[in-house]
Image (spheres, rainbow, N blue to C red):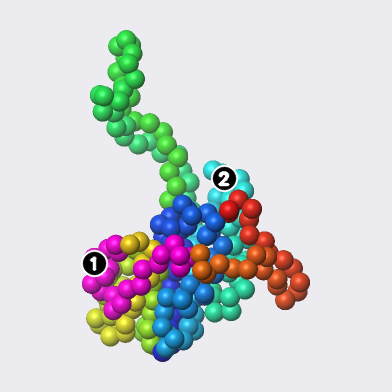
Amino acid sequence: MRTIVYVDAFNIYFRMLDKNPALKWLDLKKLCRRLLRPVNQIVGIKYYTARVSGRLDADGPRRQQLYLDALATIPELSMYWGTFLITEKFAGLVKPPNFRPKTNLAQPWPAVVKVIKVEEKGTDVNLASHLLLDAFQDAYDVAVVLSNDTDLIEPIRIVTQVLCKPIGLLSPVTNPNPKLCNVSKFIRRISVSDLAACQFDNPIVLPNGRLIHKPPQWV
């Protein structure tokens, strides 16, 4: 069965990889092959992400690019881009009385504080759009979505219930959202041991002889 895998990069990152830095050198094709059945012929892996900013971590863009270079060695994989927005905004201040510092000052507490807000835009919309378009164009027999994002419930429901194409869920959490489960035809839960078993070689040797090394911070 022709199978396309749709990967919500930031969903798996924040659900699993951020707290397991040694496993960030993840080979997505190996992971898909490990979790899916032999009958699933992977004809595409679509990876939805955004360029990280160096404002909060100056070395972050370089580390991300190394991983993107590693992913580019997977022939079936293509990348699609959203954007990161980093803004300074005022937000309401939560100030329970018990947590206020002891002070004799009579001045009133401020109602708001200024915070740095990081927002990722577009990746879930891109994923949903391609999932639907590929179904309409009969690009796959089975689709697999790696995410636990509830924004994907409706596009998955349309494909499974209206277009009658099965969609499986690769879940980066132990207990995936029940509504996502209800619209998916099958579920595979990703474990830490799955990630550990599906790492890229280090270094990766490119056809031109160039070496791609795993960032030393990912230990």
Q: Position of residue 108 (x, y in %)?
A: 29, 18
Whether 13 is among the magenta residues is: no
Residue closest to the eye, 133 or 209: 209
Q: Secondary structure at mark 2?
A: loop
Residue 137 occupies which quadrant of the picture?
bottom left
The correct choice, above or below, for 162 with respect to 122 in the image is below
Q: Is residue 123 left or right of residue 24?
A: left
At 25% from the left and 82% from the top, the residue drawn is 162
Q: Position of residue 157 (x, y in %)?
A: 26, 75
Q: Earlier in the sequence, mark 1 or mark 2?
A: 2
Residue 16 occupies which quadrant of the picture?
bottom left
Q: Which mark is residue 179?
A: 1
Q: Magenta residues, as a range?
A: 175-195
How many numbered tags mark residues here? 2
Residue closest to the eye, 17 or 160: 17
Q: Position of residue 207 (x, y in %)?
A: 72, 76
Q: Split into 4 quadrants, where in the image is the N terminus?
A: bottom left
Residue 64 occupies which quadrant of the picture?
bottom right
The Cα–Cα distance between marks 1 and 2, rounded to whole angstroms, is: 35 Å
Q: On the image, numbered disc 2 is attached to which residue?
A: 57
Residue closest to the eye, 132 or 68: 68
At 35% from the left and 36% from the top, the residue drawn is 91
Within-10-Å neighbours for mark 2: few <14, some 14–19, many 20+: few
Q: Secondary structure at mark 1?
A: helix
Name the amino acid, label 1.
Lys
